[in-house]
Image (cartoon, rainbow, N blue to C red):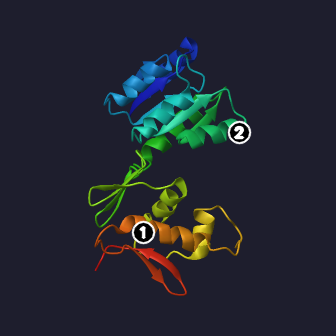
Amino acid sequence: MKILLVEDDPETAGFIRRGLTEAGHVVDHAADGPDGLHLAMGGGGYDVLVVDRMLPRLDGLGLVRALRAAGLRTPVLFLTARTGVGDRVEGLEAGADDYLGKPFAFAELAARLNALARRPPMAAEATTLRVADLEMDLLRRVVTRGGRRIELQPREFRLLEYLMRRTGQVVTRTMLLEGVWDFHFDPRTSVVETHVSRLRAKLGGEEAPALIHTMRGAGYVIRAPD
């Protein structure tokens, strides 16, 4: 197994590196965040990353967030003295796959790394959604249809994204209220109907076939024209 260790404490790094090398693994080491990010992004073919939270110049959270934003799905284990529940949640939400507190037993570290390496690789999350000639770029927050840019308000963008992620599926009014407006009750207003109508008008253009369809008594569905 090829492992990248990003740890600024020389004693801890030396201990981990010796132990993993003796176990038959290949270990590269970076002593700060930017160097770790450079190695991780450099095509080294790492199976697992071991990252300290508190790193010079770029902390572990920032490093992992940058990796995930770039689409790198290599498993990451945070190794840190920050072991509170909030710290663990923050680390996992940043994109880490596992979290081990210091001080630690080397046998547990090795077992966790082996378990991470056995996991099937995660598929990269799509950054572009398409329905017929309608395209949504999730990174640039840009929507086009037939090459024509469509300007949407933030709520309209969220509504369209919700529909496009469920292309071909009937989406109910309740689902839209919860998924787009964060309402967990029915406000008894026409907010959904009004926004869907506006969205249809913006997507329509001249002689463009409809993409959003009303399923009477059920909800809405977005699909390519027949």
Q: Is residue 144 left or right of residue 84?
A: left
Q: Amino acid at mark 2?
A: Gly
Q: Which mark is residue 110?
A: none
Vertical relation: 64 (above or below) 33: below
Q: Residue furthest bottom?
A: 217
Q: Secondary structure at mark 2?
A: helix
Distance between the alpha carbons at the discs numbered 1 and 2: 45 Å
Q: Which mark is residue 86?
A: 2
Q: Which residue is mark 1?
A: 201
Residue 191: image x %, image y %? 61, 69
Which residue shows up at 46% across the image and 63% down it?
160
Which residue shows up at 56% across the image and 26% down it?
52
Of badges 1 and 2, the one in the foreground is 1
Which residue shows up at 49% across the image and 44% down it?
115
Quadrant for the N terminus in the image: top left
Residue 223: quarter of image: bottom left
Residue 145: image x %, image y %? 31, 60
Q: Amino acid at mark 1?
A: Ala
